[in-house]
Amino acid sequence: MAQTHGWSPPEDPAAPSLLAALGQTMQTAGQLAGHGEGLLDSLQFDDQIYRLLAAMVLPELREDRPLERLRLRQRDGRDAFDELIDYIKENLAKPLTLTDLEARSHYSRRALQYAFAERMGCRATEWIKHQRLDQARRRLENPNPEDTVGSIARECGYRSLGLFSVDFQQRFHVKPSVLLRESR
C-alpha cells in the first residue's frame, strides 16, 4: 500500500502485525477468488479487510478495556459528556428525555443536571430546546421548496406546532411562518 498509494500505518507497535495480517488476508482472498463467485462473500473477506484497515487507522478500536478507552478519550480531550452532547445533536428529531440521557451517559439525573449547568449554563432540557430552535431557525432561513413550518418543526423534534411557534417567537422574536416566507 505504501508503494502504490503512499500511505503508511500510524506509528504503533501493533501496526506491523496488522499489516502482515492484512497482506495475508488479501493474498488468501486472491487465491480463493477463482474457486467460485460466492466463496469470498460467504467467508466475508471484505469484512475482515475492513476491520484490519480500521484497526490500523483507529488504534482506539483495539482497546477493549474500559480504562484504556477512558484514557484515550481523555488524551483526546473528550469525555462521556462530550459524547452525550454529540448524541443529542445527532438525534434532535427524536424525543430526548432525561431518563434516556441518563441511560446513554451513565450519569445520574442529578449529575447530568449539574454537568449541564456547569458546562452549558442551563438545564439539560433547556439546552436541548435551544439546540432544536437553532436548528429550526437555520432550516427556516434556508428552506427547501416543499418545506412547511410544521415539517421543519417535526424535523427539529417538536410534536406540537403550537408549542414550537410559541418557543420560536420567545427565542427569536419573530413568527416561524414569517421567517419562512421571508426566506423564500
Image (spheres, helix red, strand yellow):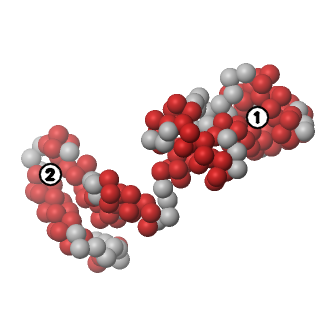
Question: In the picture shown, does residue 109 fall above or below 52?
Answer: above
Position of residue 85 measured from the top left corner of the image (x, y, whole percent):
57, 47
Q: Around disc 2, counting alpha carbons within 10 Å, would you say few (fewer than 14), some (14 to 19), or many (20 or more)?
A: some
Quadrant of the image containing the C terminus: top right
Q: What residue type is labelled 2?
A: Ala
Quadrant of the image containing the N terminus: bottom left
Q: Which amino acid does label 1 sit on?
A: Pro
Compute the Cα span from label 1 to label 2.
49 Å
Report the side of 116 relative to 137 (left or right).
Answer: left
Q: Is mark 1 on a helix, strand or loop?
A: loop
Sequence-wise, the earlier of marks 1 and 2 is 2
| Point 50% across, 64% down: residue | 77
**Residue 46 visible, this orientation:** no
Q: In which quarter of the image is residue 15?
A: bottom left
Report the side of 38 relative to 120 (left or right).
Answer: left
> Is 177 or 86 nearer to us in this picture?
86
Mark number, residue 87: none
> Is 116 or 166 nearer to us in this picture?
116
Position of residue 175 measured from the top left corner of the image (x, y, whole percent):
88, 33
Position of residue 56 measured from the top left corner of the image (x, y, whole percent):
29, 65
Report the side of 55 relative to 114 (left or right).
Answer: left
| Point 29% across, 58% down: residue | 63
**Residue 80 visible, this orientation:** yes
| Point 78% across, 25% down: residue | 163
Query: Marks 1 and 2: which is nearer the front?
Result: 1
Q: Mark 2 points at which residue?
A: 33
Q: Mark 1 points at which residue?
A: 145
Q: Around disc 1, counting alpha carbons within 10 Å, would you say few (fewer than 14), some (14 to 19), or many (20 or more)?
A: few
Q: Is mark 2 on a helix, strand or loop?
A: loop
Position of residue 173 measured from the top left corner of the image (x, y, whole percent):
90, 39
Question: In the picture shown, does residue 11 fall above or below 105?
Answer: below
| Point 48% across, 42% down: residue | 107
